[in-house]
């Protein structure tokens, strides 16, 4: 069983919900159920008030925190190629 955090931004609000599921598809179904059963928190969103667009994000959590796999990278690692090299 995995844990997922869903965030939905709509009408200047941010809805948060955590779902336990076996895979991504079941997690999406669980998020829909949480919305229907009012199992979420709401706060002012980061996209500004009155926005007509909405978007939903979700991430897999590990031990209550976001799961990030950066392999051998460490803090401050350069990603991609620099556009300007000084030296």
Image (cartoon, rainbow, N blue to C red):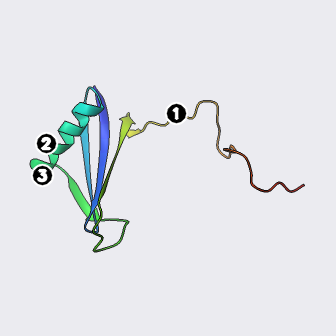
**Residue at coordinates 27% horizontally, 68% vertically from top-left?**
52
Asked if residue 76 lies left or right of residue 36, the reply is right
Callout in the foreground (2, 3):
2
Query: Residue 59: which quarter of the image?
Result: top left
Give the percent coordinates (x, y) of residue 74. 65, 39
The residue labelled by disc 1 is 69
State how far apart marks 2 and 3 are (Cα): 8 Å
Q: Secondary structure at mark 1?
A: loop
Up the image or down, 71 lies above or below 54; here it is above
Give the percent coordinates (x, y) of residue 33. 13, 42
Up the image or down, 41 lies above or below 32; here it is below
Other-residue count near label 1 (Cα within 10 Å), few / some / many at <14 / 14–19 / ≥20 = few
Q: Earlier in the sequence, mark 1 or mark 3?
A: 3
**Residue at coordinates 29% horizontally, 28% vertically from top-left?**
23
Q: Earlier in the sequence, mark 2 or mark 3?
A: 2
Q: Secondary structure at mark 3?
A: loop
Give the percent coordinates (x, y) of residue 71. 59, 30
Other-residue count near label 3 (Cα within 10 Å), few / some / many at <14 / 14–19 / ≥20 = few
The residue labelled by disc 3 is 38
State how far apart marks 2 and 1 are (Cα): 29 Å
Quadrant for the N terminus, please. Answer: top left
The residue labelled by disc 2 is 33
């Amino acid at each position: 069983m995995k844990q997922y955090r869903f965030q939905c931004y709509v009408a200047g609000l941010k809805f948060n919900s955590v779902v336990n599921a076996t895979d991504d598809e079941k997690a999406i179904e669980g998020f829909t159920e949480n919305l229907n059963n009012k199992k979420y928190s709401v706060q002012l969103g980061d996209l500004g008030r009155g926005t007509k667009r909405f978007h939903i994000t979700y991430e897999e959590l590990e031990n209550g925190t976001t799961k990030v796999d950066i392999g051998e990278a460490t803090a401050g690692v350069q990603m991609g190629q620099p556009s300007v090299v000084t030296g």
